[in-house]
Amino acid sequence: MAAEEKDADQAVQDNPDVQTDDQDVASEETQKLHLDVRIEPRSACQRHITVTIPREDIDRYFDEAFRELMPTANVPGFRPGRAPRALVEQRYRKEVKEQVKGSLLMDALTQVTEQENLAAISEPDIDVMAVELPDEGPMVFEFDLEVRPEFELPEWKGLKIERPVREFTEEDVKRRLERLLAQHGRLVPHDGPAEPGDYITVNITFKDGDRVLSEGKEELIRIRRVLSFRDARIDDFDKKMAGVKAGETREIDVTISDEAPDESLRGKTVKGIFEVLEVKRLELPKLTPELLEQLGGFKSEEELREAVREDLKRRLAFEQQQRARKQVLAALTESADWELPPDLLQRQTKREIERLVMELRSAGFSEEEIQARANVIWQNSQSATEQALKEHFVLERIAEEEGIEASPEDYDEEIYRIALQTRQTPRRIRAQLEKQDLMDSLRNQIIERKTVDRILEHAEFQDVPFEVEESDEFAIEQAAGGTPESEIPEAKYSDEQQRREPEDRS
C-alpha cells in the first residue's frame, strides 16, 4: 500500500498534468472566492461597490496559472516543460500577474452580482488599468454599478381596463385606401400657391440670432397642421405656409423642447427659415391590374378593400393593446417615485425609440407615422424614457415571478411580422437587428408584451367607442437645435426604401 502511494506521488512529480481525485474535489470546493463586499447605495439605481480579495485566493490563482503553464514553459537551458517551477515563475511572473488580475476581476464581478442579488442594468463602470494586484496582501478594487431599483410590486390582478371597439364602415375603408394609394402616387410640379396636403421642397435653416443651429437641404415636406422635428414642433404649419409659392421664403418662430440635447436651447424660441424651392401636388394612381399586383398580388379592387379592412382591424388590435398597456402601466407605476440617473436616461432614449420603431413596424405603420411618434419621444426624451424605464422594471419583476421568457419561436414570430410589414425577408430582418445590436431590445419587447398579456388575462374590461384618428402631422428627422457631435442620426428608411426616389416615399 505504501509503495502504491509512493508511486502515485512520484507520478505527480514527474508529470504536473496528472491530477488526483482529491485535487479535483479540492478544485471544485475552492472555486468560489472568499470576498469581502461592501455596497454603498448612491441612488435608487446606483451602487458603489468595494471588493476585497484575500491573499489566499490570489495565491491560489497564481498557483493554478503556473501549474497550467508548466507543461509548455520555455526556459533557456531546459526542454519545454522541464524547467524548475522557481525559474518558470521568475521568467513569466509579469505575464502571469496580468492574467491572474484579469481572471480575479472577471470572477469576482460575476460572483458579486450573483451572491448579492444585484439586478444589473448595465456593465460595471470600472477602470481596469487603475486596479493593482499587490505582491503582498489583499487585492482591493472599487466600481459603480447601475441596478434595477428595489420596490414593492403593486397588485396587478383585477385591474379595470377600458377597451376601444369599433365596427369599421365603408367610409373608414375608403379613407384608409386613399392613404395607401398616396404612398404609390406621383408628385407633379405645381405652379400655383400651395394648399394643405401639397408637398414643398425646401431648404430649412434654424438660427439663434446670427448663429446657425442646423440646416436641411432640399427637404420634401407635406403641408399638414403639424410639422415635427426631433426637438421641436410647429403647430398650424398649414396656416403658416398657406399660399406659399416656389421662390418664396417664410420665417417661423420655433420653440425648442424643454428636453432638447443642448441645454442652452431648452425652451428657447429660435428662427426657422423655409426657402421654398418647389411646390408639388400628389396625383393618386389608378387601380390598374398592375398596381393591384404590386400592392400585394390582389386580383380585384374588392379583394384589396378586404385587405384594407383587415389592416384596420390590426391597427385596432394594436390600439387596444397600446391603450390597455398604457392603463396597466399607469396603475403599476403610480407609486414608482424613485429617481433614475440622467446618464442612464440619456443612454436609454435611443433604445426606447428603437423598441418603438420595431413595435410600430410590426403593426404595419408607415415610416412617416413611425417618425412622427419617434419625434414625440425625442422632444420629451427625459420624461418619456424615465416612464418607459419604470414600466420596464415593473414588468420585468412580474415576468420573473410568473416565469415569462422569450422563446426562439417568439423571436421568429416577431421577426416574421416585421418582415411581412416591411416586405423584406425574415433572414434580412434578423441580420439587420443583429448588426444594429437590437436583439436585446427585441427580447425586452417580447417579454413586456407577454407580461402585459398575462396581466390582461386577470383584468376586467369595459368596452368604449374607438374613434379613428387620421394623423395630421408630418415628421422629419432633423433636429432644429442641431445634433450633438456624439450622436449619429440613424437612417430613417430601410436599405430598400433609401434607394427609392422621394416621389415614391410620399
Image (cartoon, rainbow, N blue to C red):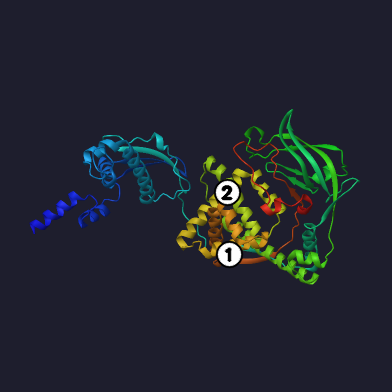
Of mark 1 and mark 2, the one earlier in the sequence is: 2
Relative to 212, 391 lies left or right: left
- Secondary structure at badge 2 equals helix
Identity of the amino acid at label 2? Arg
Q: Residue at x 89, y 48 (%)?
A: 190
- Residue in the foreground of this view, choosing between 42 and 408: 408
Whether the residues at callouts 1 and 2 have beta carbons within 8 Å, the answer is no
Q: CA distance from mark 1 to mark 2?
A: 21 Å
Q: Which mark is residue 413?
A: 1
Quadrant of res 295: bottom right
- Residue in the foreground of this view, choosing between 434 and 307: 434
Relative to 65, 110 lies left or right: right
Q: Specify few, some or many for label 2: CA neighbours under 10 Å numbering under 14, 14-19, or 20 or more.
A: some
**Where does label 2 land, which residue?**
351
Numbered circles on residues, count: 2
Q: Which mark is residue 207?
A: none
Residue 323, visible in the rendered structure: no
Q: Is residue 26 above or below residue 62?
A: below
User: Residue 30, position in %: x, y?
Assistant: 26, 50
Q: Is residue 408 above or below residue 495?
A: below
Where does the N terminus fall, quadrant-wise?
A: bottom left
User: Residue 376, position in %: x, y?
Assistant: 67, 47
User: Residue 312, position in %: x, y?
Assistant: 72, 65
Relative to 382, 219 lies left or right: right
Q: Is residue 372 above or below residue 131?
A: below
- Residue in the foreground of this view, choosing between 272 and 32: 32
Identity of the amino acid at label 1? Glu
